[in-house]
Amino acid sequence: AETRHYKFDIKFKNVTRLCHTEPIVTANGKFPGPTIHAREGDTVTVKVTNHVTYNVSIHWHGIRQLRTGWADGPAYITQCPIQTGQTFVYNFTITGQRGTLFWHAHILWLRATLYGPIVILPPKGPYPFPKPHKEVILILGEWWNSDTETVINQAMNSGLAPNSSDSHTINGKAGPLFYCPTKDTFALSVEPDKTYLLRIIKALNQEVFFGVANHHLTVVEVDAVYTKPFETKAIVSAPGQTTNALLHTDKKAGRYFMAARVFMDAPIAVDNKTATAILQYTGSSNSLNPVMPLIPALNDTAFSSNFSNALKSLNSPQYPAKVPQSIDRNLFFTVGLALNACPTCINGARPAASVNNISFTMPTIALLQSHYFNISGVFTTDFPDNPPATFNYTGTPPKNLQSSNGTRLSRIPFNSTVQLVLQDTSALTVENHPVHLHGFNFFIVGRGFGNYNPKKDPAKFNLVDPPERNTVGVPTGGWTVIRFRADNPGVWFMHCHLEVHTTWGLKMAFLVENGHGPEQSILPPGKDLPQC
Ligand code: C2O
């Protein structure tokens, strides 16, 4: 194992997309940002210096951060932000993970432009799938022709939903279906009869289908965990999820579109600003019109469900799925939107998103700091294990619409096994919530539509080879059940990875206690840890 050093200078850069130039926040002037390369077992340091007028923090999404919560990155959760002119060195070791992840800003809406890939190679030896001829990163995002901080501030002041993006992007580019196609297109040239490993990252903001015309993809890894290989015409990826898939270039030489199109089965689904990129076989002519993939329709819930059900951990002797078989803590969290009063807003109300009817209030001192240094009055540890009233989605509407505010944490003893039911409340309308947990991978042991039934549904759980991830889509109008072992002491954020749902309050945090002795305790922070 070695130590790899990176340096991110956070600065504004004028970037032109869709024939529009916008000053955006970048790392080292790059958009998308630089790639972190490492091997499993390596230590990574990233020296981040803030040269912009905003406060900044960076999250290494999916990196477990065993005992090193100080390097996790969510502002006011594990660290105070890096202020203008300040430097902070993130320092972490990659333990028991290999595959594709990504990093992104974790403050305000800076993630809209400040993100980049993380590639973790296995320590030595081969992949558990045929060696690819080449590896290609495809990072999927969205582009706004406006300042994204202004977009969210307008939404919060008006009480309306924020303006949706102007296009989806593949490697920062919208593709030939938009104007300015020559500058705005990512093209990948491939040789015939080879296998390529696509590292597909959904960085933000909406959930998408991704496919390549006439080609199938073989999924081999999700969220940096190997899966049983399975073939599909498209992958489904929520923001925060990563997918490694093999592509065989065994089709007629030519040009094919790769496309990322929104998947949104809520009734408000309108956004369809599909991004495309070109896959071009060597020797084929540039003048050939590319073929468009047959991507599922934007409300194709059945396709998305089948995809989720087909995902299984590899669960081989070398990479066993360590699914907790017994449960110490049984939690039931509702996730959803409601309306709270807002006298100054256009409709007199503003969406409030909550977990168990609690909209999370951001503290002004980082939670991990106040926990570690025993600073009182910053948070409470009385986050409820269940919603305030019995939840009933399919019968009479839930009575518990109103949400309260609070910085309430759920306290978990070290090494307990946790089962968490995530239930969409759909009080306002049915919604899709990609829920991301920091500090852990979890097993997705079950999912379904309507109300979770604690008497019947556990019988159908997969406790053998369920997929292991860090982000899960709670089905629209449905539920999902995850299990994890709380073997990582610290304060760990959990939130919806849809930008505006996080802002509206769909977030909470777990406080995982230290175990016995230094080996099971949070490591001390570095001297350069930012102060609030
Ligand atoms: Cu990728 Cu808390 O986020």
Image: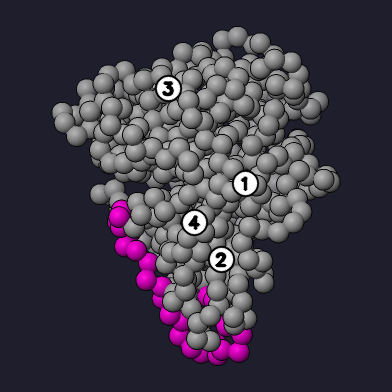
The residue labelled by disc 1 is 317
Q: Which of marks 3 and 4 is nearer the N terminus?
A: 4
| Residue 292 magenta | yes
- Location of residue 124 by image quarter: bottom right
Residue 40 to residue 18: above or below: above
Q: What residue type is labelled 2?
A: Leu
- SS of the residue under disc 3: strand
CA gap between label 2 and label 4 equals 24 Å
**CB contact under 8 Å: marks 2 and 3:** no
CA gap between label 2 and label 3 equals 38 Å
Q: Is residue 100 left or right of residue 329?
A: right
Counting other residues with Cα less than 10 Å from the Cα at mark 1, is it few (<14), some (14-19), or many (20 or more)? few
Residue 278 to residue 479: above or below: below
Q: In this view, does 76 lie to the left or right of 405?
A: right
**CB contact under 8 Å: marks 1 and 3:** no
Name which residue lies at 55% across and 21% down. 416
Q: What residue type is labelled 1?
A: Pro
**Which mark is nearer the camera, 2 or 4?**
2
| Residue 62 magenta | no
Q: Earlier in the sequence, mark 1 or mark 3?
A: 1
Where residue 526 appears, as percent x and y from the top left, is 79, 27
Name which residue lies at 34% across and 63% down. 296
Q: Earlier in the sequence, mark 4 or mark 1?
A: 4
Counting other residues with Cα less than 10 Å from the Cα at mark 2, is it few (<14), some (14-19), or many (20 or more)? many
Residue 135, numbered circle: none
The residue labelled by disc 4 is 142
Looking at the image, the residue that sits furthest to the front is 317
